[in-house]
Every structure is written in C-alpha cells, then in structure tokens.
Image (cartoon, rainbow, N blue to C red):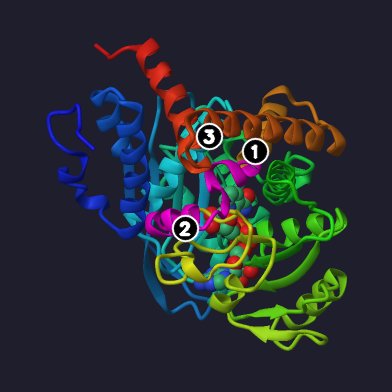
Amino acid sequence: MTTLYPFSASDLPVGEWDTPMYRLAVAQLDQTAERMKLDWNVWERLRTPQRAHIVSFPFRRDDYKTVESVVGYRVQHLLTMGPTKGGIRYDSDMNLGEVTALAMWMSWKCAIMSLPFGGAKGGVRIDPSVLSAAELQRITRRYTSEIIEVIGPDRDIPAPDLGTNEQVMAWVMDTYSQHKGYTVPGVVTGKPIELGGSYGRREATGRGVISCAVDACRHLGFAFEGARVAVQGYGAVGATAARIAAALGARVIAISDVKSGVVNPGGLDLERVDAWVREHRFLEGLPDAEGVSNSDLLELPCEILIPAAIQNQITEKNAERIQCRLLVEGANGPTSLEADAILARRGIFVVPDILANAGGVTVSYFEWVQGLQHFLWTEQEVNNRLIELMKQAFREVLAVATAEKIDMRTAALMRGITRITEAKRRRGIFP
Ligand code: NAD
C-alpha cells in the first residue's frame, strides 16, 4: 500500500519499548492508521506512551534476612482524554514493551466504550504464585510508594489484572491513603465492596465477554444456547465467563489454568470444578474429565473459544488448526497479526480484546463515578448499565466492520482511534 507520509511506519524505530507484544500493538495501530489515512502527527504520537516509569526496589522475604530487588513499571499511554486507567499485573515475564502494549490497548478500549480515560498499565516483574501473602503485601506497598506521585483519582487509577486481585487493590489504596493522610478510595478500582468497591466489578469482564459472544452468535446466526464453549484460563475473567455461559445454557466443555486443562465433551459441572479448585488449587486431576494441555485446548472442536489467560496464544503456528466458529478474546493480545489473517481467511469471526474484555474497565468507571459521588449503585443497576454499553459498543463496531468490509479488530481500532484523534484536534497543541 502506498503511504501518504514522509516515510513508512515500519521503518520507524520502536526504541526501548521493542518487544513482540509492543510490536503487535504498534502493527495493529499502523495497519489501521494507514487504512484511515490518519493524520501523521497523531499517528506518531499514539505509537509511543506519553509517560513511562520504571522503578526498582527491594523487598524482604518472610525469613527476614533475604532481601530481593524487583523491577516495576507504570506506563501512561494517553493523557488527552482524562485521567489514565489500567491494571496492575504481577508476572515474571513483565517488561516495558509488554506494559506499553497493554497501556495502548487500554486507550483504544476506553475510547471504544466512550469512557473519559486514557490508557495506562503497570506491574511488577515477579511470580506471585511463589510468594506468601505477607510478601505480596510488602511488594505491593513498596511498589505503590514508588509510583505514588504518578497515580491518583484525577491522575491515573490502577485496577486488578493478571496476578493481582481485590486484596492487592486494598493494599494500594491503603498505602496511598497513608501517604496522603486521609482515605482516598478513588485511587484504585476493583476494590473490595467494604472499601468502596462496586457490585459487579469482579464479574464485569467475564460478563462483557459473554455479552459479546451472545451478540456475535446472533449476528452469525447460530444459537448460544447449547453451543460448546472452551475457555483457556480459569481466573477472574475466564471463570466468570464460563459460569455465565453455562447459566445461559451453553455447554462449557473445557477450561484450563497455568498448569493444564480439563475437558469433558458432555459439559463440565462448574460447581464441582469450583469445589475441586478450592480444595486442590489447580484443575489437574478433576474427576469426570480428561486432561488436556493449554495448547491442545485451543484446538478442540467447539463453537466458541475464549482465550482468557495470557497473550500470544493463537499464532501462525496453530491458527490453521483452530476449530471454533467464534473467537472471543477475554485476554489481552492473545492473537498475533499473522493468526488474525489466517482466521479471517478461514471465516472464523473474532471479537477483539479491546471490545470483548472492555467490561472490566467499564465497571471500573462505574466504581470511580460511585466513589466521586459517594453513592452506591445496586448490582442490578451496574449489570444493566454494563450490558447496555457493551451491546451499544458491539453494535457500533459491527456497523463499521460491515460498512467498511473489514474485520472487527480493525473496525474497533478505527472507532477508538477516531475518537481520540478528534479529542486531540479539539484540544490543540500546547503552547
Ligand atoms: P487471573 O490471574 O485471575 O487468571 C489468569 C488465569 O490464567 C488463571 O487461571 C491462571 O492459572 C491462568 N494462567 C496464567 N498463566 C498462564 C499461562 N502461561 N498459560 C495458561 N494459563 C495461564 O487473571 P485475569 O484477571 O483473569 O486476567 C486474564 C486475562 O484477561 C489477562 O490477559 C488480562 O490482561 C485480561 N483482562 C483482565 C481484566 C480483569 O478485569 N481482570 C480485564 C481485561 C482484561
């Protein structure tokens, strides 16, 4: 494709952010920007984050004498739209490029949902599964202190992500409040209800994923009820998506965790699964089910596949063997650019992460609003408003995809980037 710009985007250096995940996020942006004939100044601004913080700090292991140093990040991609917003991830593979890609996707996600935020992301490069609760608390409090000047209810508002949860958010909120001298619930979302969390936040991402799956089924002309669903990752997002899918009459045939998965073509009994996980922590050994590896799970015959664990799971290596009709991305960045092209050629409909998993940030927004107003909504109100916004966003993205004859990811990106571009144009450049 000829470019209107002084040089080709692929020639641009990607600098210190350069990692596979950052390259994926930028390649998605570049492809879409080229198609949109996006103003080069805006395009260039959106390729790199506005602010990126790297910190390193010590924390004490439980034996007291061992002190380890860890690296943490907080990246704010876009400051144009309001405060920035994005999760905190604890994972041993974290790096600046990964956090930046995730922050960029948050920008598009917030814009698609018309939320008044830019994208951010943060995290600490650790394996949370080998740390005690006391160690996690010390890491969380020190990490919060290290980034305290760049977060805040009007500045940048973290939330849970891979490896973090409500408890971690409570520690972030408490540490921030101790520094300020008064309680500041609005500094994080995804808090426990007792500390100003919102009803429905824990389930919001999974609920949004299933809302998109139901709408996509309707569009594709097959019934959600009775459809076989395979879910990679039985965590906050995946387990909720599986439970809601089962409650709506779908057949959840496979689920997995970090170790491995389980499959039962007749459908898994999720109450028994949850009881097993409470007792044994991992899915391995679940009665009445066969074991399956995380990679084989993706290739099972099913109608709906929901990757809800980590990035880079569907690539050019396995995309030809994926057998679902509908792929709904609960995780961030599960599908590579090459896989996208293969899936499109094979007629597999993809609801992209920046739309499918936007339910989490949407209810985070509700939580932030409730905090500012000191007013608690009921669970029903939260869920109804969430579904209304998810359905509206799905309709709008599908309308762009249909009108432009493009896939849902490109359509979603176009919607998000258009909104951001317009906001940038209206604000102008300082000074
Ligand atoms: P989680 O930590 O609650 O659950 C993750 C699940 O994936 C667990 O079952 C874990 O065992 C499994 N897992 C971890 N590493 C794995 C690996 N290498 N291979 C296979 N499985 C693995 O995390 P979560 O909050 O459910 O997040 C899952 C995904 O959804 C992430 O990509 C996250 O960025 C995305 N996401 C989460 C939210 C949210 O509100 N929590 C919102 C939007 C997107």
Q: Position of residue 88 (x, y in %)?
A: 51, 52
**Disc number at residue 335?**
2
Camera-near label (1 vs 2) is: 2
Q: Nearer the viewer, residue 72 or 26?
A: 26
Camera-near label (3 vs 2) is: 3
Q: Which residue is mark 3?
A: 401
- Give me the C-alpha separation between circle 1 and circle 2: 25 Å
Task: Identify the amino acid type marked 3.
Answer: Ala
Question: Mark 1 vs ligand 1: CB under 8 Å?
Answer: yes
Magenta residue span: 335-360
Q: Nearer the viewer, residue 129 or 270?
A: 270
Please determine whether, in this image, residue 138 is positioned above or below residue 105. below
Task: Identify the amino acid type marked 2.
Answer: Thr
Q: Which residue is mark 1?
A: 364
Residue 153 seen by the camera:
no
Would you say the residues marked 3 and 2 are in contact, meaning their CB atoms lie under 8 Å apart?
Answer: no
Q: Residues within 10 Å of mark 2 (few under 14, many from 20)?
A: many
- Apparent side of residue 107 relative to residue 175 in the rendered image (left or right): left
Q: Position of residue 381 (x, y in %)?
A: 83, 32
Q: Is residue 38 magenta?
A: no
Q: Secondary structure at mark 1?
A: helix
Residue 197 seen by the camera:
yes
